[in-house]
Amino acid sequence: MQALIRPGDALWWGQSSAEPLTLTRTLTAQRHAIAQGGRLRVFVGMDASGTLAPEQADVFDFFGYAGGGGHRKLAQAGVLDIVPSHYSHLAALIRAGRLPADVLLLQVSPPDAQGRHSLGAVREYLPAALERARVLIGEVHPGVPWTHGGPYLAASDFDVLVEASEPPLELARAAPGEPEQAIARHVAGLIEDGATLQLGIGALPEAVLAALHGHRDLGLHSGAVLDGIAALAEAGVLTHARKSRDVGVGVGGILMGGSRLRRWAHRNAQLVLRESDYTHDAEVLASSHKLAAINSAIEVDLTGQINAEVAGGTYLGAVGGAVDFLRGAARSRGGLPIVALPATARGASRIVAQLSGPVSTPRSDAGLIVTEHGVADLRGQSLSRRVRRMIDIAAPEHREDLERQAHALLRQCGAAFA
């Protein structure tokens, strides 16, 4: 790496389960020699490995779109510079040079019979970085699936291509608790047969997928492809047969799961991984029949404003793709723009009168808010009606306090609380 990477270079790699661990751990361990007395910029997405640490800011300048998961410690240490971008914009920002990408580290599959390596578990914004990067370094592991969707790479396309000494990451999911299971039942009750699914990440989306096994002919158009997607496909529930776009094929951006998901995805012609400027594209989403967009949040206020970025004064999340998907689902024929979250966290209400962080999604884009206590359909509702519906799905022990705060909130908006 030292001969290829220059001081001042910006480095990128696949996030979460697509991180090329052999390369990233070599980079962090040898960072002083590789940086040659200078500094390097490192773009971070979601973390599942713990590879990066605040002390590496002695050489690295961290920037990225998210500060959650294992990268929370970077945000808390004040060494992560957040790019507050919609996920759908990232590829265009890379191609325009507004987000520099000089060196790309890739985890790739073994080659097929034509000698083509696939990008394995991820597409997202990496094809844009591939177009811009001066240096391409790759690692190959037999556990990385060969996935459809391109771009495909020959060994000669790499400046360096090595055998990986680290296997692909296994993403551990906490078992959903009763609140998550109750939320999943509510969400599953909203989704019709033949719907197209988009899901966020974590225990809650997996619980929703588990609750959908009684459905038929579901489809997939999502950024994240989770373990539960493989289970639905193997059970014959996920057929993509009624999709209005990419009929018969599931579309995703990144595999976020374990070995079962990778085995299912390997050479599976019914799954295509695409770039984020396709998976998150407004027109593509709007043309997807019955798109059920299921995303989460840190907190939602009584009028439907959503904070998905900051909790307790620390940047934990991302603007991400929630706005893209919620707007797309709202425009989709029969679509469902859903935000689902437990009503409380550590005893505090997540339905609040005033957000403690930024407005990641404005109230004008709020659709259906779901907690374990029910569903608040905010579509077409006035402020006062929204407040009533939101209080009804808050935890019972917090409703009286929320009602007191609601009067003052609505007075500010010139509305009366019924």
Image (cartoon, rainbow, N blue to C red):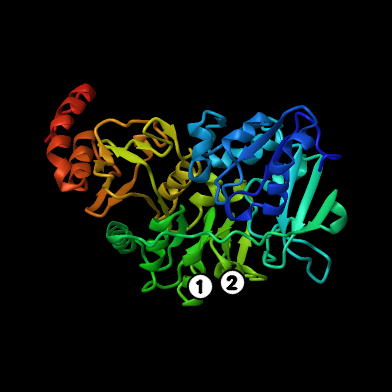
Residue at the image point whose x is 35% and y is 67% from the top = 211
In-front residue for pair 69/351:
69
Residue topped by disc 2: 264
Q: Are marks 1 and 2 in contact (CB under 8 Å)?
A: yes
Kindly tell me whether residue 158 is visible in this rendering: no
Residue topped by disc 1: 233
- Residue 137: image location, x then y, percent: 79, 49
Q: Quadrant of the C terminus?
A: top left
Q: Determine which of the numbered discs, if any, sits on residue 223 in the image.
A: none
- Residue 143: image location, x then y, percent: 67, 67
- Residue 397: image location, x then y, percent: 15, 44
In-front residue for pair 381/333:
381
Q: What amino acid is labelled 2 in the image?
A: Trp
| Kind of element beneath mark 2 | helix
Q: Quadrant of the N terminus?
A: top right
- The mark lying in front, picked from 1 and 2, is 2
Residue at the image point whose x is 69% and y is 47% from the top = 24
Local packing at callout 1 (Cα closer than 10 Å; few below 14, some 14-19, many 20+) is some
**Left or right position of 335 against 123:** left
Q: Would you identify the image quadrant in which residue 302 lies? A: top left
Q: Is residue 206 above or below residue 100?
A: below
In-front residue for pair 74/405:
74
**Left or right position of 332 against 178:** right
State how far apart marks 1 and 2 are (Cα): 9 Å
| Sequence-first disc among 1 and 2 | 1
Q: What amino acid is labelled 1 in the image?
A: Ala
Kindly tell me whether residue 96 is visible in this rendering: yes
- Residue 381: image location, x then y, percent: 25, 40
